[in-house]
Image: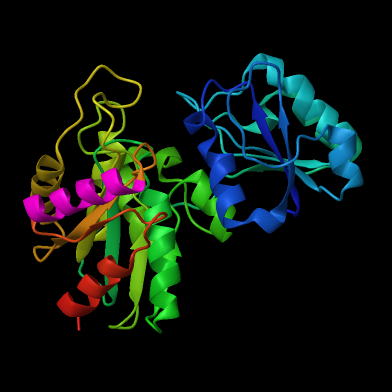
Amino acid sequence: MTIPQPYLMFLGDVPDQLAAKTAAGIADWRPEWCVGQLRLAGCRADLGIADLSIPEAKAKGARTLVIGVVNAGGVLPDHWIGVVVAALEAGLDVASGLHTRLGSVSAIAEAAARHGRQLFDVRHSDRHFATGKGVKRSGRRLLTVGTDCSVGKKYTALALEKEMRARGIKADFCATGQTGVFISGRGVAIDAVVADFIAGAVEWLSPAADPDHWDLIEGQGSLFHPSFSGVTMGLLHGAQPDAFVVCHEPTRTRMRGVERALPSIAEVIDLTVRCGQVTNPAIRPLGIAVNTKAYDEAEARRYLDSASRTHGLPATDPIRFGVGVLVDALQAEFP
């Protein structure tokens, strides 16, 4: 799908910054596409861009209202429907990464038809996927995995793509979530694929390639997360990664949205290797990516140094310090 740009980012009245991670990801990686944000009373997220009404955004050239939020179940709250209808009436298309299909809401479907506007459900694909086969395919693959949801798997994969391409390495980011699809313009929202076909969808997304080409596959969820581990496992088997990077947020004690203790980095490495060997016996950890936003620079560097010594792997904050050490390790291990 080709979604008309630029965008007006709709944040609704989400309770925190993480709940607007779709919008934040687009604003961070495609800032030139974002004319402003639209927030309702009580919204506790902020992209750091102009707050605009729908008429103001339209006057600035906005072509699509993007519902840039995530929530449990991916539902569209009833009190947001009026905003979506108003955007359609103003001449904007609407795109959403939620599980709820825009066209399944009668008021939205009728407004879109009445005003000749397009509705884009980025999380849903009309493509039919095969089941995963686990057959080894040419090319190389790296998967980002996590100790939890929302710990930087997408940002790490995008940062790796940027650094690897700068070094002349053939590399492509493979989006497996709605935000990544918005950013890259292609991909599959794996959590909306029927369970039996998740591995097959990832095999389709990362097909056979040149021996020196890297697909950098965006991870989802966590093998330890009670809600989302099924998606994570299917993605791991379909990706057949040669290498993986563990992503972590060190200030969390509980996994997001559930009463479950966060697993350790060592536990994630061990389980990822054991499960990943089902489709690639040579899978190995490459490094650790840590979101150190809660630390000052000195604390961040101390934490990264400690993590690196403990696990015998390079550790970095991809946004704060770049991913050079991870690409150095990749080039050394896969010459």
Residue placed at 40% from the left, 54% from the top? Answer: 320
Which is nearer the eye, 149 or 119? 149
Left or right of 173, for residue 304: left
| Residue 268, placed above or below residue 12 | below
For the residue pair 55 and 194, the one nearer the viewer reads as 55
- Residue 3 position, x and y percent, is 70, 53
- Residue 264 picture location, percent across and down: 14, 37
Query: With respect to residue 251, does 314 lie above or below?
Result: below
What is the span of residues highlighted in magenta in the rendered image?
297-311
* Front one among 168 and 282: 168
Magenta stretch: helix, strand or loop mostly: helix
For the point 38% across and 74% down, the residue is 164
Let me know if residue 296 appears in the view.
Answer: yes
Q: Quadrant of the N terminus?
A: bottom right
Q: Residue at x 20, y 69 (%)?
A: 136
Residue 169 appears in which quarter of the rendering?
A: bottom left
Q: Residue 183 falls in which quadrant of the image? A: bottom right
Q: Left or right of 128: which side holds 57? A: right
**Residue 85 in the image: x percent, y percent?**
81, 27
